[in-house]
Image: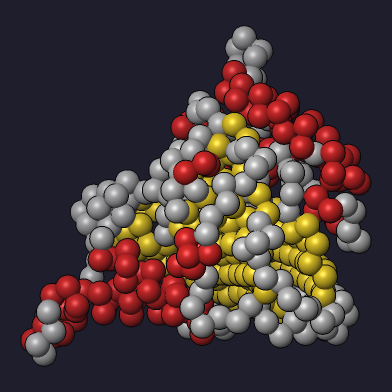
Amino acid sequence: MSAVTKPKDGVATTQSWATVALAEVKKRQGSLGSLSALIAEAEAVFSKVLFPTPRMEAWKYTNTETIAQGTYTPVAATSGEVSGDALKPFLIEGLSAHILVFVDGVYSAALSSQGELAGARIVRLSEGAVEGIGSLAPHNDDAFAALSTALLTDGVAIVVAKSAIVAKPIHIVHLATAQSTGGVVAPRLYVEAGENSQVTIIESYVATGGERYLSLPVAEIVAADNAIVDYYKYQHDAVSANHVSNTIVSQGRSGNVSTHIFSFGGALVRNNVTANLKGSGANAVLNGLSVLSGTQHVDNATEIHHIEPTIESREHFKGIYADASRGVFSGTITVDQIAQKTNAFQSNQALLLSPNASIETRPQLKIWADDVKCTHGATVGQLDQDALFYLRSRGIGREEARNFLIHAFASEVLTTVKVPALKKYVEAAITEKLGR
């Protein structure tokens, strides 16, 4: 949580680059129409808070000083267009999908292929007002979400009609090129799934180049009664990039929303995921997998709020940490007094491949009801040497045996991925990362 804490001299010096960026980006926000009030509200929120520091409990293990004291400017409004061949490695092989591509934060019509969507609309925010967008919020408890909203120049709104089933996944690719170096982008996704509707969305954050850029994505998912939404976020930014995201889910009665967060790239990454379970009979899944090396730092902070009775949530985050990488997991499940018959499960597991790798884990339960089934736990360990010995005794080489065990560790998260092509794509990313 961010706080209003001014320096002794009363000047928010850590926000100097943000102040300049906000002034520059105003020139590009004229086409956002009815969102201007939201942007102004977000800027007002951000002006009252500073970037979070480790003194704040929610950011105890993640220091954002490199972001606060850095220098970032909005990436040029003209896209650093790339060829189809350059994009091809980031398109999931075997996946038939509606594709939207943003290059350095700028929409590329040439690389996108939406096709016809029966029962759903995909609209870019820069094209004007969209029904339902009024629920977009700056999320004033988080400085990065407010800053992202204040920097908004474009985004995607997906509105799925009542009882509509979107047959093919919608794949949104955010591609960073060399042009993104030193830049800041604020990708925005808004999803409104009507009653009894069904949609699958994949967001990829990938890079062909770029150094020290900052990505501040915000994704909001509003699922009405009985809606089914599967959301996948695949993050493989440049190795020196910083990435702070907010994913906010609001779920109605008997809805089913699953959220998967895959983290492979970036220097400092923070994934904030919040699920507000507002309707009885709802079912929520929050899963995540981080595969890190070098000095990478990934912090997954999740909040699941059971607001009504008879709701089930399952949360499983795993991390694989090599070299001197560091992981953080902070997961909170809150059960309101009215939320009887709650069934909640939370687990965090870490696999350390190096004596220099580390993990800080804090699973938490806040239960105000008395008729519930809630469990949580965390485990940290290394590769099972007995299992490794067994595989090698069967003629399997050391590296092959090691990779086999690592994939087996990750498989529990991947089994819940409903898109086979995406599951295969993530498995290949694990293999490629281990190969390095």
Q: Residue furthest bottom?
A: 394
Hey, which quadrant is residue 412 in on the image?
bottom left
Can see residue 291?
A: yes
Q: 426 left or right of 246?
A: left
Q: 349 left or right of 405?
A: right
Q: Quadrant of the N terminus?
A: top right
Residue 51 in the image, given as x and y percentages of width and height? 59, 32
Residue 388 in the image, given as x and y percentages of width and height? 16, 78
Q: Which of 328 and 176 is in front in this view?
A: 176
- Above or below, 283 against 366 in this view is below
Can see residue 229?
A: no
Residue 183 in the image, given as x and y percentages of width and height? 55, 37
Q: Which of 177 and 432 is in front in this view?
A: 177
| Count of numbered circles on the image | 0
Hey, which quadrant is residue 37 in on the image?
top right
- Above or below, 32 against 69 in this view is below
Q: 141 left or right of 226?
A: left
Residue at coordinates 57% horizontally, 51% vertically from top-left? 81
Residue at coordinates 78% horizontally, 78% vertically from top-left? 117
Residue at coordinates 61% horizontally, 21% vertically from top-left? 16
Q: Specify the color scheme.
A: secondary structure
Q: Nearer the viewer, residue 347 or 27?
A: 27
Q: 122 left or right of 231?
A: right
Residue 373 in the image, given as x and y percentages of width and height? 61, 77
Hey, which quadrant is residue 260 in on the image?
bottom right
Q: Quadrant of the C terminus?
A: bottom left
Residue at coordinates 13% horizontally, 84% vertically from top-left? 396
